[in-house]
Amino acid sequence: MSKAIVHLDEIKFTWEEMKKIPDDHVAALAVLSYAVSETNALSKIYLCQSHDYIGEKAVDSASNIHRFLVIRNWSSKLFEIVEFLRFGGKKPETTDKKLRKLSTQALLRFEEISNNEGYEVAKAIRHEATNHYSFEAAKKNLESVHNSADCTMYLSKQSGNCFYPLGEEVMFHARLNRRWRNVKTKKEKDDLFNQWLAWNLAANSWLAETHAKFSDELLFRVTGKNEATPKKYWVSKAFVSRNTERLTPIFFERPEK
């Protein structure tokens, strides 16, 4: 089996070291670590869903479901970490001065990248089509569904290959159509969609920076450890690829009888 090399820089901590830090600080670092790991994974998965459209509704609809599922969840995770950093708003979940200072600074930096359409789309989609399945939103969206919408049910003996684009057409595409009802051309709508993707990328960078600042203040300065050790791992070639070389499959192959 062919092998590939993975290079990583590692700063090792033990749970015993973590337990010497105040619980509020460990909890905050844990949530930020959780979020930045998830959003980095989702951004990578999104790149691996960049299949070309081929002009066949069945294939293109399946591709859209996979691609937009990832970007919606990626976007929603970024939105959720902002809510977390408010620590309960008017009823604070923590009064720790260091955490409050770091979160205030982070939220101010977040505002700088979020006064745009990309952020507004992320917020709207999060409320109505990602974290919640809304009956009210579905009804509002009906008048914004295009006549060319794909409402076919695509069935297979392999459940992973079954998909039903009616949901995507009503809950996602029509929601965007509703928001952009006064936008005249497809190019303008594509530009607005790209603003959403650009906001995701900017927010991802902001989250990485926020995680680094919290880690520096709450962990590195306290333990005196911040030197990374280069490591390398030999793994199966199946673990490593450029996204341009190997996209995530949209369909499973039919098993041989």
Image: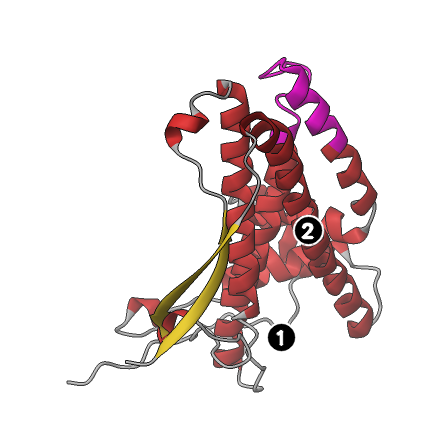
Residue 162: image location, x then y, percent: 36, 69
Mark 1 crowdedness (10 Å alpha carbons): few <14, some 14-19, many ≥20: few
Q: Are marks 1 and 2 in contact (CB under 8 Å)?
A: no
Front residue of 189 and 98: 98
Q: Secondary structure at mark 1?
A: loop
- In the rendered image, which residue does mark 1 sit on? 148
Q: CA distance from mark 1 to mark 2?
A: 37 Å
Residue numbers of the magenta segment? 84-105
| Residue 71 appears in the figure | yes
Residue 110: image location, x then y, percent: 75, 40
Q: Is residue 144 above or below residue 25?
A: below
Q: Residue at x 57, y 31 (%)?
A: 224
Question: Within the image, what quadrant is residue 136 found in?
Answer: top right
Q: Residue at x 64, y 22 (%)?
A: 99
> Is residue 158 rendered to the left or right of residue 199?
left
> Is residue 173 rendered to the left or right of residue 248?
right
Location of the C terminus by quadrant is: bottom left
- In the rendered image, which residue does mark 2 sit on? 205
Question: Within the image, what quadrant is residue 1 found in?
Answer: bottom left
Q: Amino acid at mark 1?
A: Ser
Question: Within the image, what quadrant is residue 93 found in?
Answer: top right
Q: Residue at x 53, y 74 (%)?
A: 243
Q: Which mark is residue 244?
A: none
> Is residue 63 rendered to the left or right of residue 195?
left
> Is residue 207 rendered to the left or right of residue 119?
left
Q: Residue at x 54, y 72 (%)?
A: 150
| Residue 137 appears in the figure | no
Q: Is residue 211 above or below residue 62?
A: above
Residue 101: image location, x then y, percent: 72, 23
Q: Amino acid at mark 2?
A: Ser
Q: Is residue 187 magenta?
A: no
